[in-house]
Image (cartoon, rainbow, N blue to C red):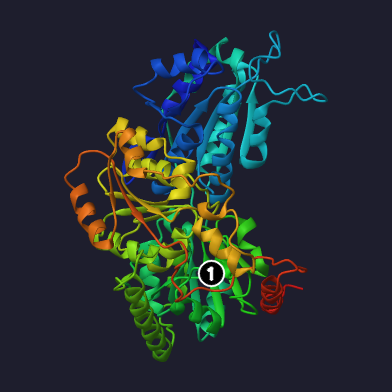
Amino acid sequence: MTTLRLTAAQAMVRWLGAQHVIVDGAEVPYFAGAWAIFGHGNVAGLGEALHAGRDALPTFRAHNEQGMAHAAIAYAKQMRRRRAMVCTTSIGPGATNMVTAAALAHVNRLPVLFVPGDVYASRRPDPVLQQIEAFGDGTVSANDCFRPVSRYFDRIVRPEQLLDALPKALATLLDPAACGPVTLAFCQDVQAEAFDYPLAFFERRVWNARRAMADADELDALAAAIRASKRPLIVSGGGVLYSGAEIALAAFAEATGIAVAETQAGKGALPWNHPNALGSIGVTGSSAANAAASEADLVVGIGTRLQDFTTGSRSLFADKPLFQVNVQAFDAHKHGAEPVVGDALRVVEALHERLRGWRVADAVCERDAAAVAAWNADVDAAVAAAPGQTLPSDAQVIGVVQAAVGDDAVVVCAAGGLPGELHKLWRTAKPGGYHLEYGYSCMGYEIAGGLGVKLAEPRREVVVMVGDGSYLMMNSELATSVMLGLKLVVVLLDNRGYGCINRLQQATGSPGFNNLLADARHAVLPEIDFAAHARSLGAHAEHVATPEELRAALLRTRGVDRSCVVVIDTDPLKTTEAGGWWWDVAVPEVSDRPQVNAARRDYEQRVRMKRDLS
C-alpha cells in the first residue's frame, strides 16, 4: 500500500480540499474555505497545514470567533446546504465563543465543520494555557460544550483516527436528515504528529446528494386526505428551499389551487405575488394566511419543524388534521401529525402525480385572493409615510429599503422586532432573497450573516437590517467585509435599546424596565455615534433623520465600492398591528401589579385554545 507521511493537521486539510459536490451541474469543492482565528492551540499545527493547502482550501481571517462561525453558517444556508465552510480556533475562549453559533446551526439544521484546538492528548504539559480542568473527569475539556449542539462530535487523540472521523463528519454534513454542525476537537499535540496515511485516502471524491423518497403508503394517505378536504393549506418551510422544490411547489399549487403560507425559513419559496401565496403564517403572519389556517380542514407542513411562532404556540392549528412532510422523522412526527418522511421535492412531485385532475373549489380560491388583496392593502398602509410622525416605525423603514433595492437583492436579519416586521411586510420576489435566522433568533448574527451571504452570492446586493442592540453585540465582521472587498449595505435602526422585548414586557403587564437605555440603571445615557463607529471600521457611513433622507442615502450607496452603513432613529414603541397571532409567553400567576393580573387572565383564556394532544 502506497502511503504518504503527513502530520494529522496536514492530512485533515488535504482531505478536506479533495471533497467535491455537484452544484448547478458543475463540480465544485464542498468546502468553500476555512475561517480561522489562530492561537496557541491551532496556529502551529492547523495553521501550518492551512498555509500549505491555501489553494485548495482558502483561509479567511475574521475578528470574532462567533462572528466567523455565523458567516460560515449563513454561507451554507444561502447555498441551500449544498456547500459548507470550516471554522478553526484555539483551545479555550476561542473555542467556546463558537458554541453559540453551533447551537444556531443545530437548531436551523445547517452544516458547518468546527475544528477547535483541544488539550494535549499526551497530557505531558497539563494543565496547558486555557485548559478547563474537571476535578472528577480527566477526559473533559472546554470542547465538551459542543457535544449537545453538534450532530456529530469526535475528539482527535491519534493521527490515524482521521481515517474514520473525517468521512463520518462529511457524511453527517451532507445527510439531508442528520444535517447540522459537526465538531472535531483536535488535540494540539496530535495536530503536529506524523502518520503514514494511505495515499488513496486523499483521492478526489465527489459526494452525491441523497433524496429520500417517502413510503408509498404515507404518500397515498396524504393524497387521500387532500382529495377528501375542501380547504387544505400548505405551510412551506425551509426544507422546500433546501430541497430545491420551489418550482415544483408552485406548479402543484397552481394545478390544485391549494394555498401556500410560509414560515420564516420558507419565505421566498413562492414569489410574494404568486396567485397561491398567502404570505407569512403564525405569530408574525399575514391576516390572509392566518385566516386560511384557522378555516382549514387540513394542514400540510412541508419542510418545517413547526416552531411555536409558526403554530401560534399550537393555537393556530388547534383540532386540525395535520400532515408533516419532512426528511427528518423527528420533525415529521411533531404535534401528533401524520408523518410523510421524505425529500420535499420528491414528495411534491409524487403528490402532483397522484392528484392530477383534483382541484379545490373556485370559491375557496376567490376567498383567498380577496384576503390577500386586503392584506396587501394593510402592508401598503404599514410601510407608508405618516405625515407629522416624529420618528419612523420599523415598517416604514422597511418600505423605504424595499423600494430602493432590486428584486434580486437579499435582505438579511435575525433577532428583535425586525424579523417579525420583515416576515409580514418584505415582498420576496426570488428564492434566496430573504435570509432570516429566526430558529435561534441570535442577536449579532446579522452583519456576520450578511458576510456569509455575500460570499455565497457575490453578484447579488446584500442588505443587512439590524437594530442598535444587535449591532452593539457584534459588529466586528463589518471590518472583515471591508477587508475582503465584500460589500454589504447595512441599515441600522436605532431605537435606543431593546425595543422588541420592551414592547413584550409591557404587553405582559410590567413597566418598561432594563430594556430601553432610558429605563436601565445608568449614570449617564450614552450618546452613541453609530455612523462614526462604522467609519472607524472602514465602512462608508452616514446618519439620516427621515425616510426621505434614508431613500437618498441608499441611492448614494450604489456608487460606493465598500460596505456602507446608514443609521436612522426609529420609534421603539410602534409596530405593525395588522396580521399576527397569539404567542405563548407565560405571565406571572401572582403579582402586586393590576396590569400583570389582567395580562394573566388574558393569558389563561388564550392557553385554552392550544392544540389538545391528549
Residue 404 located left or right of residue 172: left
Please tell me whether residue 94 is drawn above or below residue 220 in the rendered image. Answer: above
User: Which residue occupies 34% across, 82% down?
Assistant: 373
Please count the marks in the image.
1
Please tell me whether residue 281 is drawn above or below residue 332 in the rendered image. Answer: below
Q: Residue furthest bottom?
A: 363
Identify residue type, mark 1.
Answer: Val
Q: Residue furthest right?
A: 136
Rendering coords of residue 190 (x, y %)? 60, 14
Q: Which residue is mark 1?
A: 283
User: Which residue occupies 47% across, 47% down?
Assistant: 470
Residue 522 located left or right of residue 353: right
Q: Where's the C terminus, which quadrant?
A: bottom right
Q: Quadrant of residue 31?
A: top left
Rendering coords of residue 293 (x, y %)? 52, 78
Q: Is residue 224 visible?
A: no
Which of these two is toward me, 448 or 500? 500
Residue 392 located left or right of residue 130: left
Please tell me whether mark 1 sits on a helix, a strand or a loop. loop
Rendering coords of residue 596 (x, y %)? 69, 70
